[in-house]
Image: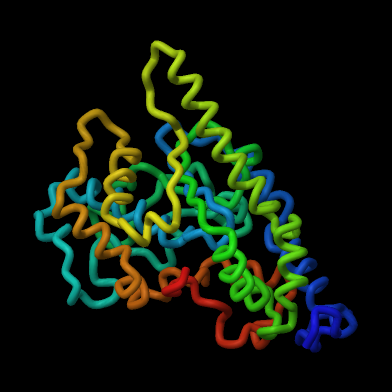
Amino acid sequence: MSAESPARPAGDDVGTESVAPLELMRQRNSLMHSPASVANGREFTPRASDVFIVTYPKCGTTWMTQLCHQIRCVRHAKKLGMPASATAYDESAKPGECFSMRFGEITEVVPWDILAMDCDQNLDDEQFLTGQEPFAKTPLVPRLFKSHETARNVARGAKYVCVARDPADVFFSFYEFLPAYMGLERGAVSMEAFCDAIFAGASHSGDLWSHFLGWLDRRDENASRLAESENKTENDVLMVSFEAMKADPRGVARRLGTFLKTEPGDEELSETDLDFVVGMSGFERMRLDASKFDDHFVRRKMWTRVGIPERDWRGGGVGKVRERG
């Protein structure tokens, strides 16, 4: 089916029978977040210790989110006085067995900034693991938030981890993901049409180049300002590449551990800590817990708003734990 061919009927959708797949994808993608929820995410006032994982779509968002979450859980365990065995990586552990995986879907403990209101989440709330005490009553620190916002639009006043990736790989990953995520059949939109649309700004995140450059400029402006200041605080933007995450996940985790410190007493991650963080964030481990990274927490809310009948989702959409990213 070409990009100009009519889309097949989408269940109870009204008028979609004559809409070309590319236009239908655009329409549905534009309805993914309500205007009120977008405004709420952008106008939110975060704490200085909050950390936003800010990425262009398909640049390793879920992977980086898991890395950051596991790092804060290591420190969380130590502050709660849990035994060292709690953060000793066990590759034989069953899915969901580790204390740091006590959540239904990762968006429940790392809210998506502009979708939070639509998902009945309050961005001002503390973030908790589920289960009995002390987890249910001891908030996780720092609070983490997922975002695909540009440096200009994101909520101000926090810290930001931005992941960049080879644009060609972003394109192929996004092409495999978004049409299916928007309820279209594989191949309904041609690669050429998708490239022209998405890299020209059809994505809610704008075009790829502006997104990357906006965050690079913000990091460099901060660095220049800090160099001239007597107050030698750290840059609030940490840039990481997807390629570095693949080549040296341990090194990236070490950098993240330093960046995510929230209190003067926070120690650098030990080698045992790094074993745990990297192990829990590895592809094989995350694949075992795939249902915790599949967006099901936000999807059902989004399906209704976008108008995609559940029977049109072909088994639940596209998984986010994929070896190629």
Is 13 placed above or below 31 here?
Answer: below
Query: Image quadrant of residue 188?
Result: bottom right
Is 39 placed above or below 295 here?
Answer: above
Indicate left or right for 148 with 110 as reference: right
Q: Give the residue displayed 33% in from the left and 57% down from the top.
A: 129
Is 260 placed above or below 8 here?
Answer: above
In x, y percent, where is residue 53? 47, 49
In x, y percent, where is residue 216? 55, 38
Query: Image quadrant of residue 133?
Result: bottom left
Please state which of residues 215 and 72 is positioned toward the viewer in this rendering: 215
In x, y percent, where is residue 237? 47, 37
Indicate left or right for 182 with 244 as reference: right
Please state which of residues 35 and 215 is positioned toward the viewer in this rendering: 215
Q: Give the residue displayed 50% in from the left and 22% down from the top.
A: 224
Q: Is residue 31 visible?
A: no
In x, y percent, where is residue 174? 60, 68
Q: Give the residue displayed 68% in from the left and 75% down from the top.
A: 179
Image quadrant occupied by the N terminus: bottom right
Q: In the displayed image of the protein, which residue is found farthest to the top? A: 230
Indicate left or right for 313 with 121 as reference: right
